[in-house]
Image (tube, grey):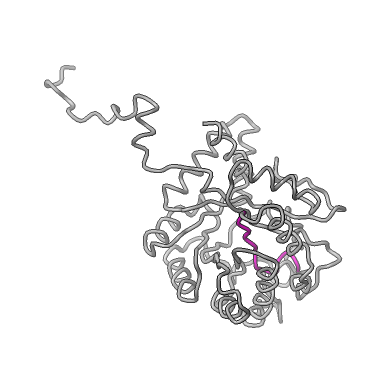
Amino acid sequence: MTFPGHFPTTRLRRLRQKQWIRDLVAESSLTVHDLILPIFLRTPEMSPEIPSLPDVKRFTLEELPSLVETISHVGIPAVALFPVVSSSLKTDRGCEALNPDNLICQAIQGFKKYNPALGVITDVALDPYTTHGHDGLLNNQQIDNDATLDVLCQQALIQAQSGADAIAPSDMMDGRVGAIRTFLDQKGFCQTLILSYAAKYASSFYGPFRQAIDAAPLQGIIDKKTYQMNPANSREALREVSQDLQEGADMIIVKPGMPYLDVIHHVSHTFQIPTLAFQVSGEYAALIAAGQKGWINTDQAMTESLLAFKRAGACAILTYWALKMAKHLLCK
């Protein structure tokens, strides 16, 4: 076939022909400063292995110096901490969450001791601590929203007192951001950040995480659909975010990540506020499993997925791949 002279005048492939050109015109970029590493903390008698999360382990307090050295060496700016609570310490009201000497508080102090400049983000919710496995207090087969707020405020306070830089309520109780902000301010912690899981969906992608923290099987209510968001909804996420911002949230987390890229985009562009994506356990495990089968190149797929979060508008990403991604970026 013969084409008219100079056809086509615009050749978009010219901008793809060499790596330096592709890098130069890239619309999104991924750096180590975009990465937050989730970390599971355990006591010595617990197993470090997490079968459903290959290459992810639980750490003891004694292992923190080496872990902090590794994190600091690759330049990851912050970690998000999650405790594995012994079943002997779990109660229906999650009392261990309010113990100022509990595992998470000791871990906060350890991280701040070994690297004061490392950002420490802590989870505020009751599911690691309760015998019924729910994020809030269970009364008469329902999650008691307002009674839970009092406990969450106390939980946030002991974490702030231990040195946490950012409190991340993931419980999805109505009004918890305002309650925590007011309570922390009254106690002298007005500089402690609140990273709200404003858009946290009732997702099937959380399975490996529940195994990782050894969460109790759900009792009383068979799922978390009465407080976590319906996966069918995106406009509702904007209402959740708007409310949390009005109540004093500094940053917003969308969870899960990849299935909710549209929500990340809507939140970040609608409100023009720092929006974080959480590449949750099920997302990570699926990519790892496919790589182990030889169906995909795991390194490339992980990089592509993390870039997708940045393209959607996320300013940072919580990912279990953070260490490997940071090491890869260092070698570029």
Report the residue at 43% width, 55% height from top: 262
Magenta segment includes 128? yes
Q: Quadrant of residue 286?
A: top right
**In the rendering, at what x and y percent does residue 307 appear?**
47, 43
Residue 321's place in the image compared with 157, above or below, is: above
Q: Residue furthest left?
A: 5
Quadrant, the N terminus = top left
Residue pictured at 52% horizontal, 54% vertical: 277
The span shown in magenta is: 118-129
Instruction: Tell me if 65 is positioned left or right of 324 in this view.
Output: right
Along the line of sight, the residue nearer the viewer: 2 or 331: 331
Decide whether residue 263 is among the magenta residues: no
Question: Foreground: 69 or 2?
Answer: 69
Residue 230, horizontal then vertical, whole percent:
52, 64
Residue at image coords 61%, 55%:
117
Q: Position of residue 23 (x, y in %)?
A: 39, 33
Residue 256 placement: quadrant: bottom right
115 vs 150, nearest the viewer: 115
**Tally of marks:** 0
The picture quadrant where one finds residue 193 is: bottom right
Compared to 304, does 196 lie above or below? below
